[in-house]
Image (cartoon, rainbow, N blue to C red):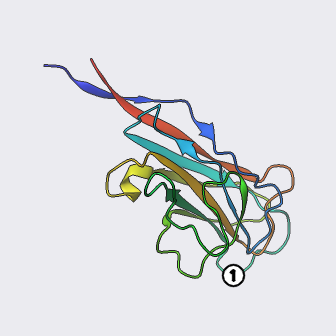
Amino acid sequence: MATLKPVYGAPTAFTATLTSLASGSARQSAVVDNTTTLALDYLIGGGFKTAAGSLGTNPAVNVWVFALTDGTNYGGTGSGNTLGGGDAAFTMPSNTGNLRLAASCVINTAASVEYFNPVSVAALFNGEMPQKFGIIVQNNTGLALDATTPGAVDYQAINLQSV
């Protein structure tokens, strides 16, 4: 009887320009296309660094996930946004119910990198991996992200192999 073991792909940074992302602003990433890789899941994780200064109340950077819903449209499109359009500014809607909150990275110290634990993308979608997905990074720290090293979010494919 064969044993199945996980095979992890190389971590890859989402394409999203986070340099100097202002507090109260958000940015969407380019889409990750799983139609070729056919990964059973992806882990997303990373960290963020703010500029120096005084943090706001409850400072955090939120990472949201959006996914292809019908072959053309992405859940969360609206409020003048076109999700899936690549690395671009994003206006957070007042109702985020169509987006999935993957992580809220609490920022404890300004100008220091704070990390969040890896999160399963499939778990955000009831155990099923979407064909295509991307992230939205929402800065709620009271400070802009750092101008040179703002941090990044990586994705890592997970498949199974028979041994």
- Is residue 22 shown left or right of residue 1? right
Q: Which residue lies under the disc numbered 1?
A: 57
Reply above or below: 74 against 71.
below
How would you rate the neighbour count of disc 1 (Cα within 10 Å): few for under 14, some for 14-19, many for 20 or more?
few
- Is residue 87 shown left or right of residue 33? right
Q: Which amino acid type corresponds to the residue marked 1 in the rendered image?
A: Thr
Reply above or below: 110 against 38.
below
Image quarter of residue 89: bottom right
Q: Give the residue at x 47% y 74%.
A: 97
- Is residue 107 shown left or right of residue 149? left
Image quarter of residue 23: bottom right
The image shows residue 40 at horizontal and vertical percentages of: 37, 39
Q: Quadrant of the C terminus?
A: top left
134 vs 83, nearest the viewer: 83
23 vs 73, nearest the viewer: 73
The image shows residue 19 at horizontal and vertical percentages of: 81, 55
Reply above or below: 128 against 81.
above
Viewer can see residue 107: no
Q: Quadrant of the N terminus?
A: top left
Q: Give the residue at x 63% y 76%.
A: 79
Residue lying furthest left in this view? Answer: 1
As helix, strand or loop, the secondary structure at mark 1 comes to loop
